[in-house]
Image: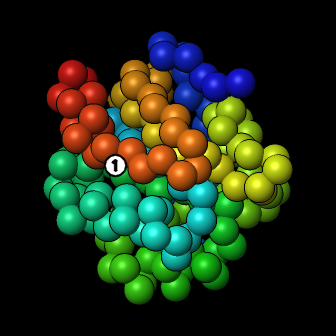
Amino acid sequence: MTLTIGALAPDFELKNQHGEVVSLSSFRGKKNVVITFYPFSFTGTCTGELCALRDELSAFQNDGVELLAISCDSPFTQKVFAERESYQFSVLSDFWPHGDVAKKYGIFDDARGCALRGTFIIDKSGVIKWQVINAISAARDINEYKTALATL
């Protein structure tokens, strides 16, 4: 089950690579949020997608937009992954309870124990305005995120 456009996005609190708690609701009324779930840190497609976001970060993290990347990897893995790739955005751990946030967003793959490639754009009021969900092996096109953000 995935969420529908126009629905209120499920709130969450997760720790980022620095051990800081980040909640979706903390951006309400302040920023639009791009949430990008990815299956596994240090894998080719996931690293490629996040590096593309890193390389065009000003489009996804600025005064009006916040970028949050989430996987079910441990906080320790997220820390090393973010440091190695020089990510300057929050890389959140949905490790325990394992995949709880991915389940709330309807994209947890029980057989593999990870999130699918799901991206959700949430407006300042906390409403889902756009989403795309790809299979684990299918990379996403960040230009689609830019187009969706331009409509907010």
- Return the residue nearer the eye: 149 or 126: 149
The spot of residue 105 in percent (x, y) is 64, 34
Q: Give me the residue at 65% from left, 50% from top.
A: 115
Location of the N terminus by quadrant is top right
- Asked if 129 appears above or below 36 in the picture, the reply is above
- Asked if 35 appears above or below 128 in the picture, the reply is below
Q: Give me the residue at 46% from left, 24% from top.
A: 128
Work out whether residue 137 can be spotted: yes
Work out whether residue 37 can be spotted: no
Which quadrant of the view contains residue 15? bottom right
Could you tell me which secondary element the residue under label 1 belongs to?
strand
Q: Say what amino acid the circle numbered 1 marks.
A: Glu
Q: Give me the residue at 66% from left, 68% from top.
A: 73
Q: Is residue 43 found left or right of 66 in the rendered image?
A: right
- Asked if 105 appears above or below 36 in the picture, the reply is above
Location of the C terminus by quadrant is top left
- Return the residue nearer the eye: 135 or 8: 135
Q: Give the farthest residue toward the front.
A: 137
Q: Which residue is mark 1?
A: 66
- Return the residue nearer the eye: 114 or 7: 114
Crowd class of label 1 (few under 14; some 14 to 19; many from 20; radius 10 Å): many
Which quadrant of the view contains residue 82? bottom left
The spot of residue 60 in percent (x, y) is 26, 49
Q: Is residue 143 found left or right of 12 in the rendered image?
A: left
Color style of the picture: rainbow
The spot of residue 8 in percent (x, y) is 55, 21
Q: Is residue 129 found left or right of 112 in the rendered image?
A: left
Q: Give the farthest residue toward the top.
A: 6
